[in-house]
Image: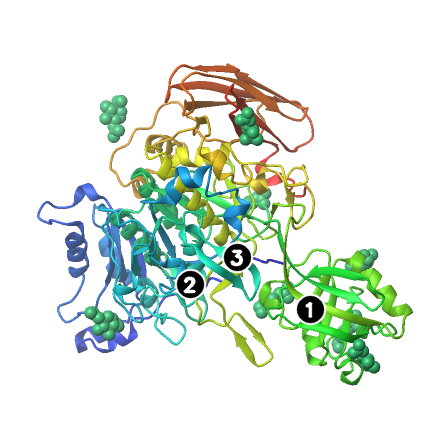
Amino acid sequence: MTRGMQFSIPISLFSLCLLLLLSLPINHAISEPEECQTYIIHMDHSQKPASFLTHESWHQSIVNSLLSTADDREMLLYSYNHVMHGFSARLTPSQLSAIEKSPAHLATYPESFGKLFTTYSPKFLGLQSESGLWPAASFGEGVIIGIVDTGIWPESESFSGKGMSPIPQRWNGKCENGTEFSPSACNRKLIGAKSFSKGLQAAGIKVSSELDYDSARDVFGHGTHTSSTAAGNHVLGASHFGYAKGTAQGIAPRAHVAMYKVLFVSDTEKSAATDVLAGMDQAIADGVDILSLSLGFRQTPYFKDVIAIASLSAIEKGIFVVCAAGNAGGHNSTINGAPWIATVGAATLDRSFTATMTLENGLTLEGISYFPESIYITNASLYYGKDDVSKAACNASALDQNEVAGKVVLCDNSTKIDVYDQMEEVKRAGAYAGIFLLDISDLRPENFTIPSLILDTASGTFVRKYVTQDSKAKVKGMRFMLTKLGAKPAPQVASFSSRGLDPINPGVLKPDILAPGVDVLAAVTPIRPFIKIGKYKLVTDYALYSGTSMATPHVAGVAALLKAVHKEWSPAAIRSAIMTTAYTIDNTGSILKDESTGLPATPLDFGAGHIDPNRAMDPGLIYDMDIQDYIEFLCGLGYDEKQMKTILQRSQWNCSQEPTDLNYPSFMAIFNNEKVKKFSRVVTNVGEEEAVYHANLKFPTGIKITIEPSTLTFTQKYQKQSFVLSMETDKEAPGMVYGFLNWIDQHNHTVSSPVVVIKTQLNHIPLTK
Ligand SMILES: *[C@@H]1O[C@H](CO)[C@@H](O)[C@H](O)[C@H]1NC(C)=O
Ligand SMILES: *[C@@H]1O[C@H](CO)[C@@H](O)[C@H](O)[C@H]1NC(C)=O
Ligand SMILES: *[C@@H]1O[C@H](CO)[C@@H](O)[C@H](O)[C@H]1NC(C)=O
Ligand SMILES: *[C@@H]1O[C@H](CO)[C@@H](O)[C@H](O)[C@H]1NC(C)=O
Ligand SMILES: *[C@@H]1O[C@H](CO)[C@@H](O)[C@H](O)[C@H]1NC(C)=O
Ligand SMILES: *[C@@H]1O[C@H](CO)[C@@H](O)[C@H](O)[C@H]1NC(C)=O
Ligand SMILES: *[C@@H]1O[C@H](CO)[C@@H](O)[C@H](O)[C@H]1NC(C)=O
Ligand SMILES: *[C@@H]1O[C@H](CO)[C@@H](O)[C@H](O)[C@H]1NC(C)=O
């Protein structure tokens, strides 16, 4: 069962040009009506005739040349300049083939649709006003975070301009006027807001309805949540119906926000690839420093993946791109795993939401609850249908209203009935409250539509014994809306967080990093009902959301802080700093656990580990990369020339003769039949001028690893040193082992990289842990 926010994607969507064909003159109508479909067309920029001053005018003329004189429809959706070279348009097959005959044509991809993958977290991350990254970065002052999402609720206090520095001079973006969105809603916090819906509209999806607006205003709540998580201003007394009460603030509370709305609520929530490209194109043109995407498409090769293509352009311009790894939970399920993207998985916080129950015998038990009202139940009879399996388990229609009305009902775990169905039954029968037994709960806050308490089976067994033995069993009191810190173990890998191997490129470890993504409190839209209690629909300004969508803006915020401190760092350097300083030990002193099993997790689940912002400020060494490193990586993938041009947007590039390793801050060794593997890396000193690093390997037996040289001596800042990691395996059974390479210097830097070794054929990886 998946707990993250998930939305279905339609397999294929195209609209007929029927209405338009009907308006054509007679001579056109006699030909067979052709289906129009939206395509993304990649063009070779170097072939633009000099007579066109802009690419857009070139693109427009290509499309115009396909139109008959009487045909005045808008075929060109977007002309792209930054994320790729080309355009998107609605075309018939014959129009498409006319374009494809042009020597300047590189590639065509049909439209596709993507999905979305939810404050205390700054404190959990160790951010403090007096010391560390926050004050060093002036809380992100001057940095611009672009969010590609469902829009924004500009009136939220989280987007107040109070205390914000002026909008940077270099900013080219603006706030677009539209339905229920006035440019005057923007301020020094929210400095840009635009909506991109031509692709969805071309697919026949109504974006302007009672459900959503064709403007940057957020109706769904997701974009407001992610934006306020990354850079929300301080808001006192925020809470989710009284839970998690405190000061809400983003990770970079002084950074500016720009919203690029590409996702709309229609029959389901969706976004079109053409719109996502347009949003990212605009963000690059506007001058964002960080680009955060909590959405994704199906896993496809990079030359077909709009987010991968657009991100490479962004990276080349120095923009840090961070994306959600997905909410699919299982192994081999990461999305957005291109090696130039920072790919984020979700982790739990050490916070829990509880209620307590005191029995007549004086014993008080505590369990999980998110019931959103502060009620206190006193002196209620406790009911347990002990003589009837269906009643005991609160099976649908099993409870007798006369027996349970006004009582607290215990529903046991003797059957496999879904807790949600048990809750419905308790509600139907008119009981006061329900007690449910469950060790690992997948219930979301919005599931608590009646006063209910989830007890672990140990406490549950105790209550069951009490109510079975005492025919006058009573609940003295039940109290809701308690928020507790210090839950153990924490953090854990969230059950829904997508895991490696990366299906597109197993050779790079993904996800890269974990960040808080479970029950994150942030701003939402105050008009969308969060939960229905009886006949009341409850709304809230702040809500608890879960998903890798919520983890991603945490990393965007940390990247903004790092950018404020280290203006010269490349996107790869920022990611390296975040990864090599991550931690893998939880608050019980053990390796991070997997929430879904309670068992130790591995780098396939947590990547380099959990983000640690203060340490990321001073990583000691970085594994840097630039566009040429990614070009070399792409050279090794065996793509043809057109595919390479599609990704790289240039007509010439250099591939070295020797296959080269990406200078990645993690190591993934997949042994097929070979005995030895070698990885070359270059590290750059960003710590003290004089530093001597010693390699320290933490590795299980069975694998022989050597580092050459094992000591790296630096005498100045930005000096580079290279080393080679070689490993040899014996003939043990296939499987996965992992360890860490730590470079440790005399100034207390530990530069840590996970090293994963997989001894098998790729399609035989044992996926159980
Ligand atoms: C802004 O958009 C609204 C809704 O589309 C429209 O009614 C209004 O006239 C627009 N205002 C300006 C100044 O364009
Ligand atoms: C508790 O409820 C019982 C009836 O179920 C009633 O007789 C008793 O007086 C109540 N006790 C208190 C303290 O309200
Ligand atoms: C629950 O009820 C359904 C139908 O009412 C029945 O098919 C099912 O067997 C019951 N389950 C249990 C465990 O009693
Ligand atoms: C929680 O509620 C949602 C929406 O109401 C529902 O789709 C989901 O199945 C529920 N979860 C569980 C575990 O019952
Ligand atoms: C119910 O909980 C008890 C007590 O912990 C446990 O032993 C039992 O396996 C559970 N039953 C089911 C069906 O999960
Ligand atoms: C991983 O996913 C890819 C693509 O979805 C598939 O081809 C491959 O067989 C999967 N590998 C494993 C080990 O499940
Ligand atoms: C390729 O490498 C050669 C030799 O280093 C250099 O002269 C040339 O400019 C490079 N071309 C590109 C497109 O980078
Ligand atoms: C060394 O680093 C660790 C972990 O970052 C930290 O807990 C410790 O206080 C540091 N020690 C010194 C002497 O700075």
Residue 556, percent across and down? 42, 46
Alpha-carbon span between mark 2 and mark 1: 33 Å
Of the residues shown, which amino acid type is indicated by label 2? Lys
Crowd rating for badge 1 (residues with CA inside 10 Å; few <14, some 14–19, many 20+): many
The earlier-in-sequence mark between 3 and 1 is 3
Q: Nearer the viewer, residue 44 or 414?
A: 414
Dot 3: what SS? Answer: strand
Residue at (80, 82) in percent of width and height: 403
| Image position of 523 (left or right of 94) | right
Nearer the observer, 611 or 425: 611
Up-down: is 468 above or below 603?
A: below
Q: Which residue does the numbered mark 2 point to in the structure image? A: 270
Residue 307 lies, in percent from the top left, at 38, 49
Q: What element carries label 1?
A: strand
In the rendered image, the vertical position of residue 183 relative to residue 57, given as above or below: below
Image quarter where the N terminus lies is bottom right
Question: Which corner quadrant of the figure contains ligand 4?
Answer: bottom right
Query: What crowding class fits label 2: few (fewer than 14 Cα within 10 Å), some (14-19), or many (20 or more)?
Result: many
In the displayed image of the protein, which residue is found farthest to the right? 469
Residue 213, given in percent of the width and then of the height, sits at 35, 70
Q: Tell me which label, 2 or 3, sits earlier in the chain.
A: 3
